[in-house]
Amino acid sequence: MHFLAVVVLFPLLFWGLSLGCGVLVERLTGTRMPALLLMPFGFGALVSVSQFTTWWGPTAPLTPLILLALALLGFALGRDVLRARWRGRPGGWWWGISAALATYLLVAAPVIVSGRPTFSGYLLDTTGAIQMAGAERLLHHAHHFSTGLPAYGTTLAAYFGTGYPSGAHGVMASLGWLSGQEVIWLYSIFQALDLSLVALVLTFLARRVGLGRWPAAVTGTVASVPALVYAYALMGSIKELTALPMIVSMGALVLCARPLRLAVGARALLPFAIVAAAALGAIGIAASPWIALFGV
């Protein structure tokens, strides 16, 4: 049951909260947005909000409940729209979802095939332990790293106390709390889920350039896991993999910019602002060139 909670329940929670917050972003924007982009936008909202809530001690432990409340609010406000989307779904609608699921299974395969909760990259990138410890600490104590364990506190302060990007950590720890699982067993799975969102965006882009539904889904899957990105996942590069769906989402928004602007005016900037903020939270100032490129 523990293994199933890690590889099944946690992903469903990740996708569910991302979808709920994506619908909330859509409602706040005021116009219907491409279905394949709702989860990436929602994940951006989760990252952005958790950056604020984990900064202050009193709100940090409430982060899981705040994120859950936002997702539920999105489902409540968008229930009629979701119902209409479902009734009017086109043939082959499931290809995009299949791309996300296939990408998740490909990247999480080392964990899933092992048949037990584990994580990849042991001793390949030793910062993995610091990332996990930082996620737990941020959720319970925000950016306060004074502890009775000098080495532990000093190490975390040297990372997260100096502006180290923590966009992924608050979300991962919050979803871990909601699913009842320890962060150590969710670390690799979380990064596989990040790339499943990349597959959704790339499938959308492939559709926009004229590919059919299944060729677009295959393209989105393959393009989401090139060798370099897969290597990053195996070694546990959580910052880069969390930033990636946000960066490609900014690119997708370039294609949607004109119709969004015509439909809702200045509110069309909201989705871009959310994913740009999430990219900054995930990887820091390294996201700035991408924000400038797509923002212009």
Image (cartoon, grey):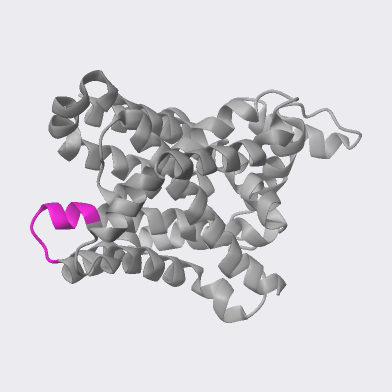
Q: Residue furthest top?
A: 266
Question: Residue 164 location in percent, x, y?
Answer: 58, 31
Asked whether residue 261 is in view, the answer is yes
Q: Residue shown at 58%/36% (left/top)? A: 166
Q: Quadrant of the C terminus?
A: top left
Question: Residue 67 location in percent, x, y?
Answer: 58, 39
Range of magenta residues:
204-212
- Whether residue 257 is situated above or below residue 171 in the rendered picture: above
What is the total number of numbered labels drawn onto the structure image?
Answer: 0
- Whether residue 193 is situated above or below residue 239 in the rendered picture: below
177 lies left or right of 196:
right
Observer-nearest of 212 and 228: 212
Q: Residue shown at 43%/27% (left/top)? A: 285
Question: Residue 78 location in percent, x, y?
Answer: 39, 42
Observer-nearest of 32 and 253: 32
Q: Quadrant of the N terminus?
A: bottom right
- Whether residue 242 is situated above or below residue 179 in the rendered picture: above
**Quarter of the rendering containing residue 222:** bottom left
Residue 106 lies in the magenta-colored region: no
Q: Residue shown at 43%/49% (left/top)? A: 19
Q: Residue furthest left?
A: 210
**Quarter of the rendering containing residue 179:** bottom right
Question: Residue 103 location in percent, x, y?
Answer: 39, 66
261 lies left or right of 65:
left
Observer-nearest of 41 and 286: 41
